[in-house]
Image (cartoon, rainbow, N blue to C red):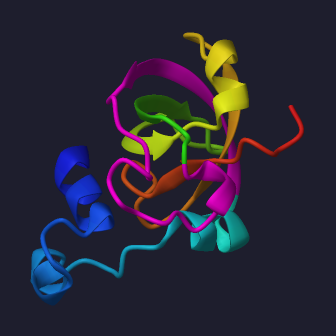
């Protein structure tokens, strides 16, 4: 599930066994890598809940330093691929402080996804033109 994926991302399982945890899976792409190379798909926000943590509170340095104090949210999004039924993705991601007030059910988003595993490997592109 999303929680285990987040633990891997957070590295709290220790770097040594992070490879074991994802054995058999493709390498986990960082948010920065997804934003750089992922397929852009329109999405709609289905649910969101704050986890009470930030990258700084977890002692992490995010790939985008401006997100160091961005609150983590469990985001559930409906991804709209061309010619496919909508796919629901769920992940814990930092939400830029400036974007938190606009979070709302049904909010249109642009997500960068790994087409091989969009439900787990997606990241909201908060900088995308709406």
**Residue 90 at x, y = what percent?**
37, 38
Q: Is residue 86 visible?
A: no
Place residue 101 in its image quadrant. top right
Q: Is residue 128 above or below residue 101?
A: below
Residue drawn at point x = 33 percent, y = 80 percent: 26
Q: Is residue 123 above or below residue 50?
A: below
Position of 20 with respect to 71 (left or right) is left
Does the magenta run of residues contain 91?
no
Does the magenta run of residues contain 59?
yes
Position of 47 with respect to 98 (left or right) is left
Quadrant into which the C terminus falls: top right
Residue drawn at point x = 43 percent, y = 52 percent: 55
Question: Total label count?
Answer: 0
Place residue 23 in its image quadrant. bottom left
Position of 38 with respect to 88 (left or right) is right
Magenta part of the protein: which range? Answer: 40-68
Nearer the observer, 78 or 95 = 95
Nearer the observer, 124 or 73 = 73
**Residue 77 at x, y = what percent?**
49, 31
Nearer the observer, 27 or 3 = 3
User: Farthest residue toward the right?
Assistant: 129
């Amino acid at each position: 599930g999303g929680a285990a994926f987040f633990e891997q991302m957070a590295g709290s399982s220790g770097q040594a066994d992070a490879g074991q945890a994802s054995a058999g899976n493709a390498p986990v792409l960082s948010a920065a890598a997804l934003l750089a190379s992922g397929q852009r798909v329109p999405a709609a926000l289905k649910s969101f809940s704050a986890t009470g943590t930030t990258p700084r509170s977890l002692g992490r340095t995010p790939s985008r330093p401006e997100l160091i104090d961005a609150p983590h949210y469990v985001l559930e999004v409906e991804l709209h691929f061309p010619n496919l039924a909508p796919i629901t993705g769920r992940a814990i991601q930092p939400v830029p402080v400036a974007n938190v007030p606009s979070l709302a059910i049904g909010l249109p988003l642009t997500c960068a996804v790994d087409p091989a595993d969009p439900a787990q490997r997606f990241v909201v592109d908060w900088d995308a033109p709406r």
